Every structure is written in C-alpha cells, then in structure tokens.
Image (spheres, helix red, strand yellow):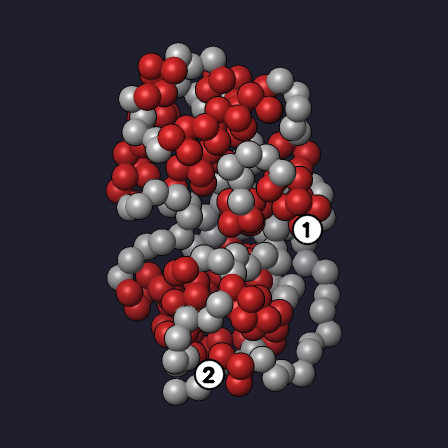
C-alpha cells in the first residue's frame, strides 16, 4: 500500500486553456490528455468503461435537481424529483409561486425546501443572475453561488461542471470520489479533501473529466452509480 503523500511529488506539466465541455468528443479529448498527464490513469480508464458526458441544461431546474440529488439515497432523490417535475415546468418563477402545501408533498427535508425557496425567490425577483454565473471564471462563479443560503461548494462545483460545462473542477469533498481515488491508487485510507485537491492538480486543466472518470470507476468497482446527474 502507498500513502497519499507519496502521490504528490510529481513534476508539474505545462497547462493549456481548455474550453467548455459540450459533447462526448470533449470527454474523449480529456481522457486522452489525462493519460498523458498522468500515465497511471490509463489503467483506471480501462477499468471504468465508458465515461458518461452527463450534461444538463443550465438554469434553476438544473441547479434544483443537483440540490435534490443530495439525499440519503439516489432512489429517494429520484422520487422527489419526479414529484417536483410532475407539477409542471421547473422554473424559478413557477417554483416560487407554488403553494407551500404542494411543496410539502415533495418529500424534501426542511433544509432543502428552504434552499429551493430562497433560490427561486432570489432568481425570480432579480437578486441573483444564475443565467450569467456560468460564464464567469470558475472561482468567481463558485464564490457567488456559495453566497446563496444553502448552496455549498459541492453544489456550486457540480452545477458548473454538469450544467455549464466547466472543464477544470474536481469536487474534492465528494466522498465517492475520495473512495474511488483511494481504491484506484491503493491508498491506506480515503484522502482528505485537502489532500485530494493537491493530487488533482496534476489533472488540470481536465479535472472535470478526471472527476467523471473516478465516478465511473466507483460505479464499476463498487457497483453503485453516485454521479450527481443521471
């Protein structure tokens, strides 16, 4: 077994700018580049099988689905999302206008119900411009999103990855990613978020593809699909 610290001493590669991820060709380009950046990933690509694109439309609906996905189980999240979408189109204005009694039937936790209500109100009343946040530089986009009540770094990172196509994000606080990296590299324990951030620097500017790869690896090895979007 090796420790996570042993994986950090790598010579930095020259980085290049990467555009927005839009289709499967971008995923393949990212995988090819990642194997060049870190040859250890070749075996992980082989073990993982196809790496899904999984892009959703940007906007309130996409962000709301990510918030809902943070349930105890994927089945619970999917059931709640079906109830929400059954009411009608999921927009900030339509959600803000829902009767509280209707929202109560969705099965949301009190915290998530409050987050969605705050978010829909902020967007529909013009206090937050979600439509433009995806065009910002990643760090600034995350900073603005986490200023919203109930929106944490993981939620912001996943939204920017899967709804806006940002190519260089690795959600280091994701437990499944920590477990997948530990398993793939034979670590003694799951790396902390801080240690995983250090490791993931080697995969820049394709960290969003690396995250997809390790989620796919987790699904292949642990037989559980934990990617935030279906």
Place of residue 165 in the rendered image (x, y in percent of width and height, measured from the top left) = 58, 48
Place of residue 226 in the rendered image (x, y in percent of width and height, measured from the top left) = 36, 54
147 displayed left or right of 100: right
- Mark number, residue 3: 2
Instruction: Tell me if I can see residue 34 in this picture.
Output: no
SS under mark 2: loop
Q: Quadrant of the N terminus?
A: bottom left
223 displayed left or right of 34: left
Place of residue 228 in the rendered image (x, y in percent of width and height, measured from the top left) = 42, 48
Residue at position x 39%, y 60% from top? 176
Residue at position x 40%, y 52% from top? 227
49 displayed left or right of 204: left
**For residue 99, which quarter of the picture?**
top left
Q: Residues within 10 Å of mark 1 (few under 14, many from 20)?
A: few
- Mark number, residue 170: none
Residue position marked by numbered label 1 in the rendering? 139
Q: In which quarter of the image is the C terminus?
A: top left
Q: How far apart are marks 1 and 2 (CA)?
A: 29 Å
In the rendered view, tell whether residue 156 sits above or below residue 37. above
**For residue 128, which quarter of the picture?**
top right
SS under mark 1: helix
Front residue of this view, candidates 218 and 32: 218
Residue at position x 36%, y 20% from top? 103
**Number of the front mark, 1 or 2:** 2
Place of residue 125 in the rendered image (x, y in percent of width and height, measured from the top left) = 62, 18
């Amino acid at each position: 077994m090796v420790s996570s610290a042993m994986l950090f001493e790598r010579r930095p590669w020259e980085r290049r700018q990467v555009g927005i991820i839009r289709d499967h060709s971008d995923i393949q380009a990212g995988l090819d580049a990642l194997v060049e950046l870190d040859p250890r990933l070749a075996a992980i690509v082989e073990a993982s099988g196809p790496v899904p694109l999984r892009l959703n439309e940007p906007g309130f609906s996409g962000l709301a689905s990510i918030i809902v996905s943070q349930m105890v189980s994927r089945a619970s999240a999917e059931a709640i999302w079906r109830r929400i979408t059954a009411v009608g189109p999921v927009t900030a204005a339509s959600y803000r206008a829902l009767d509280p009694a209707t929202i109560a039937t969705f099965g949301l936790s009190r915290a998530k119900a409050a987050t969605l209500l705050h978010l829909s109100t902020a967007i529909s009343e013009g206090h937050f411009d979600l439509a433009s946040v995806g065009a910002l530089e990643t760090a600034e986009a995350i900073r603005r999103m986490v200023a919203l009540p109930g929106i944490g770094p993981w939620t912001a990172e996943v939204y920017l990855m899967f709804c806006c196509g940002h190519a260089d994000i690795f959600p280091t606080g994701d437990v499944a990613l920590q477990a997948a990296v530990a398993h793939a590299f034979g670590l003694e324990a799951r790396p902390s978020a801080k240690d995983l951030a250090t490791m993931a620097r080697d995969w820049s500017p394709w960290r969003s593809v690396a995250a997809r790869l390790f989620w796919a690896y987790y699904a292949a090895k642990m037989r559980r699909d934990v990617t935030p979007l279906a």
